Protein backbone atom coordinates (compact mmCIF):
# COMPACT_ATOMS: atom_id res chain seq x y z
CA UNK A 1 0.00 0.00 0.00
CA UNK A 2 2.77 2.46 0.87
CA UNK A 3 4.42 1.99 -2.52
CA UNK A 4 1.05 2.08 -4.27
CA UNK A 5 0.24 5.51 -2.85
CA UNK A 6 3.70 6.72 -3.80
CA UNK A 7 3.20 5.74 -7.42
CA UNK A 8 -0.36 7.01 -7.54
CA UNK A 9 0.89 10.43 -6.50
CA UNK A 10 3.14 10.30 -9.60
CA UNK A 11 6.20 11.23 -7.59
CA UNK A 12 8.37 8.20 -8.24
CA UNK A 13 12.10 8.66 -7.88
CA UNK A 14 13.72 10.29 -10.91
CA UNK A 15 17.31 9.45 -11.72
CA UNK A 16 19.54 12.08 -13.35
CA UNK A 17 19.92 11.46 -17.09
CA UNK A 18 23.72 11.27 -16.75
CA UNK A 19 23.59 8.22 -14.46
CA UNK A 20 25.46 5.11 -15.65
CA UNK A 21 23.47 1.94 -15.01
CA UNK A 22 25.37 -0.81 -13.23
CA UNK A 23 25.20 -4.05 -15.18
CA UNK A 24 25.87 -6.31 -12.19
CA UNK A 25 22.84 -8.38 -11.04
CA UNK A 26 21.77 -8.72 -7.41
CA UNK A 27 19.32 -11.17 -5.83
CA UNK A 28 17.71 -10.59 -2.42
CA UNK A 29 15.81 -13.46 -0.73
CA UNK A 30 13.97 -13.35 2.59
CA UNK A 31 12.58 -15.67 5.24
CA UNK A 32 9.78 -14.08 7.25
CA UNK A 33 6.97 -14.95 9.61
CA UNK A 34 5.23 -11.60 10.12
CA UNK A 35 6.56 -9.53 7.21
CA UNK A 36 9.45 -7.63 8.83
CA UNK A 37 12.18 -9.47 6.91
CA UNK A 38 10.19 -9.00 3.71
CA UNK A 39 10.13 -5.24 4.32
CA UNK A 40 13.89 -5.13 4.85
CA UNK A 41 14.49 -7.24 1.73
CA UNK A 42 12.33 -4.88 -0.31
CA UNK A 43 14.21 -1.86 1.04
CA UNK A 44 17.56 -3.44 0.08
CA UNK A 45 16.30 -4.31 -3.40
CA UNK A 46 14.90 -0.80 -3.81
CA UNK A 47 18.21 0.68 -2.68
CA UNK A 48 20.06 -1.43 -5.24
CA UNK A 49 17.87 -0.11 -8.05
CA UNK A 50 18.15 3.45 -6.75
CA UNK A 51 21.95 3.25 -6.66
CA UNK A 52 22.27 2.02 -10.22
CA UNK A 53 22.00 -1.78 -10.20
CA UNK A 54 20.07 -2.75 -13.31
CA UNK A 55 19.25 -6.43 -12.79
CA UNK A 56 17.70 -6.73 -9.33
CA UNK A 57 15.45 -9.52 -8.05
CA UNK A 58 13.85 -10.15 -4.66
CA UNK A 59 11.60 -12.96 -3.46
CA UNK A 60 10.92 -15.42 -0.65
CA UNK A 61 13.68 -17.98 -0.06
CA UNK A 62 11.37 -20.91 -0.73
CA UNK A 63 10.56 -19.45 -4.17
CA UNK A 64 14.11 -20.20 -5.36
CA UNK A 65 15.39 -23.77 -4.73
CA UNK A 66 18.78 -24.05 -3.05
CA UNK A 67 20.01 -26.05 -6.05
CA UNK A 68 19.69 -22.88 -8.15
CA UNK A 69 21.46 -20.51 -5.77
CA UNK A 70 24.97 -20.94 -7.14
CA UNK A 71 23.71 -20.34 -10.68
CA UNK A 72 22.02 -17.06 -9.78
CA UNK A 73 23.48 -14.06 -11.60
CA UNK A 74 25.57 -11.99 -9.20
CA UNK A 75 25.75 -12.05 -5.39
CA UNK A 76 22.95 -13.20 -3.08
CA UNK A 77 21.70 -11.18 -0.09
CA UNK A 78 19.64 -13.13 2.46
CA UNK A 79 17.40 -11.54 5.09
CA UNK A 80 15.75 -13.72 7.69
CA UNK A 81 13.99 -13.46 11.02
CA UNK A 82 13.76 -15.94 13.88
CA UNK A 83 10.32 -16.88 15.12
CA UNK A 84 9.35 -18.25 18.52
CA UNK A 85 12.22 -19.91 20.39
CA UNK A 86 14.71 -20.14 17.53
CA UNK A 87 12.27 -21.54 14.97
CA UNK A 88 12.51 -21.14 11.20
CA UNK A 89 10.17 -18.53 9.64
CA UNK A 90 7.44 -19.68 7.27
CA UNK A 91 8.85 -18.54 3.93
CA UNK A 92 12.14 -20.44 4.32
CA UNK A 93 10.98 -23.72 5.87
CA UNK A 94 11.56 -25.75 2.69
CA UNK A 95 14.89 -24.02 2.13
CA UNK A 96 16.18 -24.79 5.61
CA UNK A 97 14.95 -28.39 5.53
CA UNK A 98 16.85 -28.87 2.28
CA UNK A 99 20.00 -27.29 3.70
CA UNK A 100 19.94 -29.64 6.69
CA UNK A 101 20.05 -32.72 4.47
CA UNK A 102 23.32 -34.61 3.99
CA UNK A 103 22.83 -34.51 0.21
CA UNK A 104 22.06 -30.77 0.10
CA UNK A 105 23.29 -29.27 -3.20
CA UNK A 106 26.64 -27.45 -2.73
CA UNK A 107 26.86 -23.71 -3.29
CA UNK A 108 30.53 -23.52 -4.31
CA UNK A 109 31.44 -20.06 -5.55
CA UNK A 110 28.29 -18.39 -4.20
CA UNK A 111 29.04 -14.91 -2.85
CA UNK A 112 26.46 -14.16 -0.17
CA UNK A 113 25.59 -11.86 2.72
CA UNK A 114 23.17 -12.59 5.58
CA UNK A 115 21.27 -10.11 7.71
CA UNK A 116 19.13 -11.35 10.60
CA UNK A 117 16.23 -9.75 12.45
CA UNK A 118 15.87 -10.72 16.08
CA UNK A 119 15.10 -9.68 19.63
CA UNK A 120 17.80 -9.95 22.28
CA UNK A 121 15.24 -10.60 25.02
CA UNK A 122 14.94 -14.13 23.61
CA UNK A 123 17.52 -16.78 24.49
CA UNK A 124 18.09 -17.80 20.86
CA UNK A 125 18.74 -14.31 19.55
CA UNK A 126 18.98 -14.29 15.75
CA UNK A 127 19.46 -18.06 15.87
CA UNK A 128 18.23 -18.66 12.32
CA UNK A 129 20.48 -16.03 10.71
CA UNK A 130 23.54 -17.41 12.49
CA UNK A 131 22.74 -20.97 11.45
CA UNK A 132 22.02 -19.94 7.86
CA UNK A 133 25.33 -18.09 7.56
CA UNK A 134 27.31 -20.99 9.04
CA UNK A 135 25.58 -23.62 6.88
CA UNK A 136 26.25 -21.69 3.68
CA UNK A 137 29.94 -21.53 4.56
CA UNK A 138 29.90 -25.32 5.15
CA UNK A 139 28.32 -25.81 1.72
CA UNK A 140 31.08 -23.86 -0.01
CA UNK A 141 29.71 -20.32 -0.09
CA UNK A 142 31.89 -17.22 0.37
CA UNK A 143 30.53 -14.48 2.66
CA UNK A 144 30.96 -10.97 1.29
CA UNK A 145 30.73 -9.43 4.77
CA UNK A 146 30.22 -10.80 8.26
CA UNK A 147 26.59 -11.56 9.07
CA UNK A 148 24.53 -8.62 10.33
CA UNK A 149 22.32 -9.08 13.39
CA UNK A 150 19.51 -6.61 13.90
CA UNK A 151 18.05 -6.25 17.39
CA UNK A 152 14.54 -4.95 17.95
CA UNK A 153 15.63 -3.78 21.41
CA UNK A 154 18.16 -1.28 20.03
CA UNK A 155 17.29 2.40 20.13
CA UNK A 156 16.51 2.43 16.41
CA UNK A 157 15.36 -1.16 16.22
CA UNK A 158 16.82 -3.34 13.47
CA UNK A 159 17.99 -0.26 11.57
CA UNK A 160 20.65 0.35 14.22
CA UNK A 161 22.61 -2.62 12.83
CA UNK A 162 21.22 -2.54 9.28
CA UNK A 163 22.68 0.87 8.42
CA UNK A 164 26.32 0.05 9.30
CA UNK A 165 25.95 -3.40 7.72
CA UNK A 166 24.83 -1.88 4.41
CA UNK A 167 27.62 0.69 4.58
CA UNK A 168 30.07 -2.22 4.87
CA UNK A 169 28.34 -4.34 2.21
CA UNK A 170 27.81 -1.83 -0.59
CA UNK A 171 31.44 -0.94 -1.40
CA UNK A 172 32.30 -4.66 -1.43
CA UNK A 173 29.53 -5.30 -3.94
CA UNK A 174 30.90 -2.43 -5.97
CA UNK A 175 34.45 -3.82 -5.74
CA UNK A 176 33.56 -6.41 -8.41
CA UNK A 177 32.39 -3.77 -10.87
CA UNK A 178 34.20 -1.69 -13.42
CA UNK A 179 35.87 1.30 -11.78
CA UNK A 180 33.43 3.89 -13.13
CA UNK A 181 30.45 1.79 -12.06
CA UNK A 182 31.98 1.18 -8.62
CA UNK A 183 32.48 4.90 -8.14
CA UNK A 184 28.85 5.46 -9.11
CA UNK A 185 27.57 2.99 -6.53
CA UNK A 186 29.72 4.45 -3.78
CA UNK A 187 28.67 8.00 -4.63
CA UNK A 188 24.94 7.32 -4.97
CA UNK A 189 24.85 5.12 -1.90
CA UNK A 190 26.26 7.96 0.16
CA UNK A 191 23.63 10.22 -1.38
CA UNK A 192 20.76 7.94 -0.39
CA UNK A 193 22.06 6.78 2.97
CA UNK A 194 19.14 7.40 5.24
CA UNK A 195 21.16 8.46 8.27
CA UNK A 196 23.21 11.03 6.41
CA UNK A 197 22.56 14.75 6.56
CA UNK A 198 24.48 16.90 4.05
CA UNK A 199 26.99 19.26 5.63
CA UNK A 200 25.43 22.68 6.13
CA UNK A 201 21.92 21.41 5.40
CA UNK A 202 19.02 21.27 7.84
CA UNK A 203 16.97 18.92 5.64
CA UNK A 204 17.69 15.20 6.12
CA UNK A 205 18.22 13.01 3.08
CA UNK A 206 15.59 10.32 2.64
CA UNK A 207 16.21 7.04 0.87
CA UNK A 208 14.76 6.88 -2.64
CA UNK A 209 12.06 4.28 -3.17
CA UNK A 210 11.50 2.14 -6.24
CA UNK A 211 7.98 0.66 -6.17
CA UNK A 212 7.37 -3.08 -6.35
CA UNK A 213 4.04 -2.45 -8.07
CA UNK A 214 3.21 -0.47 -11.17
CA UNK A 215 0.09 1.69 -11.07
CA UNK A 216 -1.32 3.25 -14.22
CA UNK A 217 -4.37 5.49 -14.43
CA UNK A 218 -6.31 4.54 -17.58
CA UNK A 219 -8.60 6.61 -19.74
CA UNK A 220 -12.28 5.96 -20.43
CA UNK A 221 -11.62 4.13 -23.69
CA UNK A 222 -9.21 1.69 -22.06
CA UNK A 223 -11.64 1.14 -19.21
CA UNK A 224 -14.45 0.26 -21.61
CA UNK A 225 -12.22 -2.04 -23.65
CA UNK A 226 -11.23 -3.97 -20.53
CA UNK A 227 -14.74 -3.94 -19.07
CA UNK A 228 -13.61 -2.77 -15.66
CA UNK A 229 -15.36 -5.00 -13.11
CA UNK A 230 -17.55 -3.61 -10.40
CA UNK A 231 -18.11 -6.85 -8.49
CA UNK A 232 -15.63 -7.79 -5.73
CA UNK A 233 -12.67 -9.90 -6.86
CA UNK A 234 -13.36 -12.86 -4.59
CA UNK A 235 -12.98 -16.60 -4.72
CA UNK A 236 -16.00 -18.85 -4.29
CA UNK A 237 -17.38 -18.49 -0.77
CA UNK A 238 -19.97 -16.71 1.30
CA UNK A 239 -20.22 -13.73 3.62
CA UNK A 240 -19.65 -14.00 7.36
CA UNK A 241 -20.64 -11.56 10.08
CA UNK A 242 -18.48 -10.97 13.15
CA UNK A 243 -20.78 -11.82 16.07
CA UNK A 244 -18.45 -11.44 19.07
CA UNK A 245 -14.82 -10.72 19.89
CA UNK A 246 -13.61 -12.07 23.24
CA UNK A 247 -10.20 -11.13 24.57
CA UNK A 248 -8.47 -14.17 26.08
CA UNK A 249 -5.43 -12.44 27.56
CA UNK A 250 -5.58 -10.04 30.50
CA UNK A 251 -6.17 -6.38 29.73
CA UNK A 252 -2.73 -5.44 31.04
CA UNK A 253 -0.95 -8.18 29.04
CA UNK A 254 1.30 -6.90 26.24
CA UNK A 255 -0.30 -9.30 23.72
CA UNK A 256 -3.92 -9.22 22.64
CA UNK A 257 -5.05 -12.78 21.91
CA UNK A 258 -8.74 -12.87 21.08
CA UNK A 259 -11.37 -15.37 20.04
CA UNK A 260 -13.55 -14.18 17.16
CA UNK A 261 -17.00 -15.74 16.70
CA UNK A 262 -18.51 -15.56 13.22
CA UNK A 263 -22.10 -15.98 12.17
CA UNK A 264 -22.83 -17.52 8.79
CA UNK A 265 -26.02 -17.47 6.77
CA UNK A 266 -28.19 -20.54 7.25
CA UNK A 267 -28.19 -21.10 3.50
CA UNK A 268 -24.39 -21.42 3.29
CA UNK A 269 -23.12 -24.88 2.40
CA UNK A 270 -20.37 -25.22 4.98
CA UNK A 271 -18.69 -28.33 6.34
CA UNK A 272 -15.24 -28.71 7.90
CA UNK A 273 -13.08 -31.80 8.07
CA UNK A 274 -9.69 -32.45 9.64
CA UNK A 275 -6.77 -30.75 7.78
CA UNK A 276 -9.12 -28.27 6.05
CA UNK A 277 -8.00 -24.65 5.84
CA UNK A 278 -10.43 -21.75 5.81
CA UNK A 279 -9.51 -18.50 4.10
CA UNK A 280 -10.99 -15.23 5.32
CA UNK A 281 -11.05 -12.28 2.91
CA UNK A 282 -11.87 -9.07 4.78
CA UNK A 283 -12.85 -5.83 3.10
CA UNK A 284 -12.03 -2.34 4.36
CA UNK A 285 -14.39 0.08 6.01
CA UNK A 286 -16.37 2.02 3.41
CA UNK A 287 -15.71 5.35 5.15
CA UNK A 288 -11.95 4.97 4.62
CA UNK A 289 -12.38 3.63 1.09
CA UNK A 290 -14.67 6.46 0.00
CA UNK A 291 -12.45 9.12 1.57
CA UNK A 292 -9.26 7.91 -0.12
CA UNK A 293 -10.95 7.19 -3.45
CA UNK A 294 -12.55 10.65 -3.50
CA UNK A 295 -9.22 12.27 -2.60
CA UNK A 296 -7.73 10.95 -5.86
CA UNK A 297 -10.91 11.30 -7.92
CA UNK A 298 -11.57 7.53 -7.91
CA UNK A 299 -9.88 6.93 -11.29
CA UNK A 300 -9.79 3.58 -13.05
CA UNK A 301 -6.38 2.04 -12.49
CA UNK A 302 -4.36 -0.94 -13.64
CA UNK A 303 -2.18 -2.42 -10.89
CA UNK A 304 0.53 -4.94 -11.67
CA UNK A 305 4.09 -5.93 -10.74
CA UNK A 306 6.91 -3.53 -11.53
CA UNK A 307 8.76 -5.66 -14.08
CA UNK A 308 10.72 -2.67 -15.37
CA UNK A 309 12.81 -2.21 -12.23
CA UNK A 310 12.90 -5.79 -10.94
CA UNK A 311 13.84 -9.02 -12.70
CA UNK A 312 11.83 -10.99 -10.15
CA UNK A 313 9.69 -10.17 -7.13
CA UNK A 314 7.16 -11.94 -4.87
CA UNK A 315 3.99 -13.16 -6.50
CA UNK A 316 0.85 -11.26 -5.56
CA UNK A 317 -1.26 -14.39 -5.38
CA UNK A 318 -3.75 -12.96 -7.86
CA UNK A 319 -4.68 -10.08 -5.58
CA UNK A 320 -3.31 -7.46 -7.96
CA UNK A 321 -4.34 -8.29 -11.51
CA UNK A 322 -3.34 -6.10 -14.47
CA UNK A 323 -6.95 -5.33 -15.38
CA UNK A 324 -8.67 -1.97 -15.20
CA UNK A 325 -10.56 -1.50 -11.92
CA UNK A 326 -11.91 1.51 -10.04
CA UNK A 327 -9.55 2.78 -7.37
CA UNK A 328 -12.24 2.33 -4.72
CA UNK A 329 -12.44 -1.39 -5.50
CA UNK A 330 -8.66 -1.80 -5.29
CA UNK A 331 -8.57 0.00 -1.93
CA UNK A 332 -11.53 -1.98 -0.62
CA UNK A 333 -10.18 -5.45 -1.46
CA UNK A 334 -6.42 -5.39 -1.87
CA UNK A 335 -4.87 -3.30 0.92
CA UNK A 336 -5.05 -3.52 4.69
CA UNK A 337 -6.00 0.05 5.53
CA UNK A 338 -6.50 -0.79 9.21
CA UNK A 339 -3.02 -2.17 9.84
CA UNK A 340 -0.58 -0.13 11.88
CA UNK A 341 1.50 1.97 9.49
CA UNK A 342 4.95 0.49 8.87
CA UNK A 343 8.03 2.68 9.06
CA UNK A 344 8.55 2.28 5.33
CA UNK A 345 5.34 4.23 4.72
CA UNK A 346 6.91 7.31 6.26
CA UNK A 347 9.94 6.93 3.99
CA UNK A 348 7.61 7.14 1.02
CA UNK A 349 5.68 10.08 2.44
CA UNK A 350 8.97 11.89 3.08
CA UNK A 351 10.00 11.24 -0.52
CA UNK A 352 6.78 12.55 -2.07
CA UNK A 353 6.07 15.51 0.22
CA UNK A 354 7.04 19.01 -0.89
CA UNK A 355 6.57 20.57 2.55
CA UNK A 356 9.90 20.77 4.45
CA UNK A 357 8.14 20.47 7.82
CA UNK A 358 6.31 17.35 6.67
CA UNK A 359 9.52 15.84 5.30
CA UNK A 360 11.24 16.41 8.63
CA UNK A 361 8.38 14.83 10.57
CA UNK A 362 8.04 11.84 8.23
CA UNK A 363 11.79 11.24 8.36
CA UNK A 364 11.67 11.33 12.16
CA UNK A 365 8.89 8.73 12.24
CA UNK A 366 10.81 6.53 9.80
CA UNK A 367 14.10 6.64 11.66
CA UNK A 368 13.43 7.20 15.38
CA UNK A 369 11.95 3.97 16.70
CA UNK A 370 10.60 5.24 20.07
CA UNK A 371 8.79 8.09 18.32
CA UNK A 372 7.39 5.71 15.68
CA UNK A 373 6.20 3.29 18.38
CA UNK A 374 4.48 6.08 20.29
CA UNK A 375 2.83 7.56 17.20
CA UNK A 376 1.66 4.36 15.50
CA UNK A 377 1.37 1.66 18.14
CA UNK A 378 0.63 3.28 21.50
CA UNK A 379 -1.89 5.63 19.93
CA UNK A 380 -3.22 2.86 17.63
CA UNK A 381 -3.05 4.85 14.39
CA UNK A 382 -3.93 2.93 11.24
CA UNK A 383 -2.41 3.17 7.76
CA UNK A 384 -5.53 4.99 6.54
CA UNK A 385 -5.18 7.60 9.27
Image (cartoon, rainbow, N blue to C red):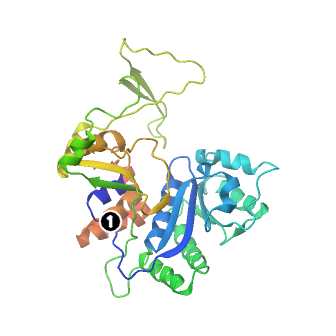
Residue at the spot x=56%, y=24% of the render?
276
267 shown above or below 137: above
Tell me residue 332's x, y (percent): 30, 40
Residue at the spot x=55%, y=75% of the render?
170
The single residue placed furthest to the right in the displayed view is 102
Depth order, front residue of 381/280: 280
Q: Horizontally, is 198 left or right of 64 in the view?
A: left
Do we see residue 85 in this rendering?
no
From the image, tell me which residue sits under label 1. Answer: 12
Residue at the spot x=77%, y=52% of the render?
104
312 shown above or below 94: below
Q: Horizontally, is 137 left or right of 64 in the view?
A: right
Tell me residue 6's x, y (percent): 31, 59
Tell me residue 99's x, y (percent): 74, 51
Depth order, front residue of 212/376: 212
Mark 1, Cα crowd under 10 Å, few <14 / some 14-19 / many 20+, is some
Residue at the spot x=66%, y=72% of the render?
144
Do we see residue 282 in this rendering?
yes
Amino acid sequence: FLYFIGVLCATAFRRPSSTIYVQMPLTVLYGTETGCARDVAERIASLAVATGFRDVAWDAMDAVPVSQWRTLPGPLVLVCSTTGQGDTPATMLDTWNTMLQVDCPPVDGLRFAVFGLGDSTYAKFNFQAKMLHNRLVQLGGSPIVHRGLGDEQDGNGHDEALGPWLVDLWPKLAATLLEDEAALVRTEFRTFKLEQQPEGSEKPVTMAFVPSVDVRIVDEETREQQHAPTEPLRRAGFDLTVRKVTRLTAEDHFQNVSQIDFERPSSADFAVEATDAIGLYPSNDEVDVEFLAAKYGNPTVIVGPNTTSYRRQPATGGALTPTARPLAQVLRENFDLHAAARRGLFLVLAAISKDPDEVERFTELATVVPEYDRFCWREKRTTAE
